[in-house]
Image (cartoon, rainbow, N blue to C red):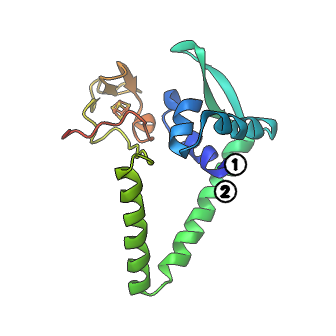
Amino acid sequence: MQAQTLLFVRDTKSFATSVGNLARHLGATHASTVGVVDGLVARGLLRREADPRDRRSTLLRLTDAGRRAADRLERWGHLLGEALAALPVEERGTLERGLGAVIWALRAAGHLEVAEPCRGCAHFRENAAPGSPEPHRCNLLQAFLSEEEARKYCPDFTPAEA
Ligand code: SF4
């Protein structure tokens, strides 16, 4: 869960990296998620920061060492991808179908929340402020977003066709 936590903090919108959202992402209890976070904070990989929108809440941030660790994990993921790519096509297809079935089953049972970037979200207004460093707008959060933020994962994603 430590690796998933580092990647969650790196790849999730900066205003959505709460412990509650992390717990839902991990499918873990709040208590065990706090334990994971405390361990990473003690190792100097994560830090807590007051949420500027709600001073009673905190958001998780990577330290420099945490970002390096997350980037190493991603490289490891690419190596795994390369190893899978070396499998014969039929074996890879079987593996992908199996994993897809597991993910759909978990989603259908409500055990897995799939968050996605802004494009395709019902609340997204692309390029609402052209030329600004934060050109996009989220109507749900009533906030402008940079291109980088718009590409990160969001627990409030709502499919546009919903
Ligand atoms: S709710 Fe939708 S538009 Fe707003 S930040 Fe999340 S994904 Fe983007």
Q: Which residue extends farthest left?
A: 161
Near-viewer residue (44 or 93): 93
Residue kind at label 1, given as amino acid type:
Arg
> Is residue 5 at least partly visible in the picture?
yes
Find residue 30 and report its horizontal and vertical position in percent.
61, 33
Q: Residue most toward the top?
A: 55
Circle 2: residue type: Arg
Residue nearest the observer in this picture, 157 or 124: 157
Q: Quadrant of the C terminus?
A: top left
- Residue 101 lies, in percent from the top left, at 37, 65
Q: Is residue 81 left or right of residue 75?
A: left
Residue 13's spot in the image, x, y percent?
Answer: 48, 34
Q: Nearer the viewer, residue 131 or 156?
A: 156
Judging by the rendered image, the residue that carries numbered circle 2 is 72
Does mark 2 have its CB less than 8 Å from ligand 1? no
Is disc 2 in contact with disc 1, using a CB cutoff of under 8 Å? yes
User: In this image, 52 relative to 158: left or right?
Assistant: right
Residue ID for mark 1: 68
- Residue density around tag 1, few if under 14, some if 14–19, many if 20 or more, within 10 Å: some
The secondary element bearing badge 2 is classed as helix
> Which type of secondary structure does the marked residue at label 1 adopt?
helix
Residue 157 in which image quadrant: top left
Q: Which mark is residue 93?
A: none
